Image (cartoon, grey):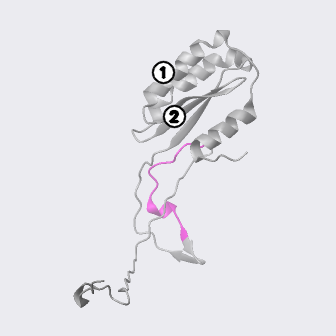
Amino acid sequence: MRSVSRRFRRPAKPPNLSVSSNLVLIDVSVLDQNGRPVRGLPAVAFHLFERGAKQRILSICETEVPVSVIILLDESGSMGRRVTQSVQAVKQVPKGSTKSDEFALISFSDRVVLESDLTTDAGAIQARLLAGFAGLAGIGGRTSSCSEIGFSSRQRTGWSGS
């Protein structure tokens, strides 16, 4: 066995790193009573407390963060006349999305089908949704609500419990 020269040996005790910060970033979402984002609020509209003591807010910054949306497409006979409303809602999907938002599509009736895994191509999801709704006139079957909710949960979280 060779001996290692002293200059290449690890120090017995690793150096300590100490950092202090006077800036803390806090993510906040403000929604109105209809669940829509409220934009353009000034710093004075916010109050921040730490252990009961009011903290000073130096600045605020408005940013958009990506979201992941799993769209559940009900292809069962229970959709009936609501198909038109669903098609109109689907047309709105790409309008409010950003390039970083991702979408997945799961259809269900008697069974649950993963139509599209998570993708940032909202247009492809919209096209698949509209094609699915266009063919709903001949589609029917019972709705398996528990199945699609469980399937979508596993799709997003990777959970495989029963």
Q: Residue at x 69, y 26 (%)?
A: 111
Indicate whether 64 appears above or below 8: above
Highlighted magenta segment, given as a residue range: 34-48
Q: In front: 4, or 80? A: 4
Q: Residue furthest front?
A: 1
Indicate whether 58 appears above or below 2: above
Residue 123: x and y in percent read 44, 26
Q: Residue furthest right?
A: 142
Q: Residue at x 39, y 81 (%)?
A: 20
Indicate whether 44 appears above or below 99: below
Q: Residue at x 63, y 43 (%)?
A: 154
Secondary structure under the numbered disc 1 in the rendered image: helix
Whether residue 154 is visible to the viewer of this picture, yes or no, is: yes
Residue 76 image-quadrant placement:
top right
Disc 1 marks which amino acid?
Ala
In-image side of 150 versus 48 (left or right):
right
Q: Is residue 94 magenta?
A: no
| Marks 2 and 1, the one that precedes in the sequence | 2
User: Circle 2 is placed at which residue position?
Assistant: 117
Q: Marks 2 and 1, how far apart in space?
A: 14 Å
Label 1 neighbourhood size at 10 Å, few (<14), some (14-19), many (20+)? few
Query: For the residues carrying marks 2 and 1, which lies nearer the camera in this image?
Result: 2
* Number of numbered tags placed on the structure image: 2
Q: Is residue 45 magenta?
A: yes
Q: Quadrant of the C terminus?
A: top right
Q: Residue furthest top?
A: 138
Secondary structure under the numbered disc 2 in the rendered image: strand
Disc 2 marks which amino acid?
Asp
User: Circle 1 is placed at which residue position?
Assistant: 127
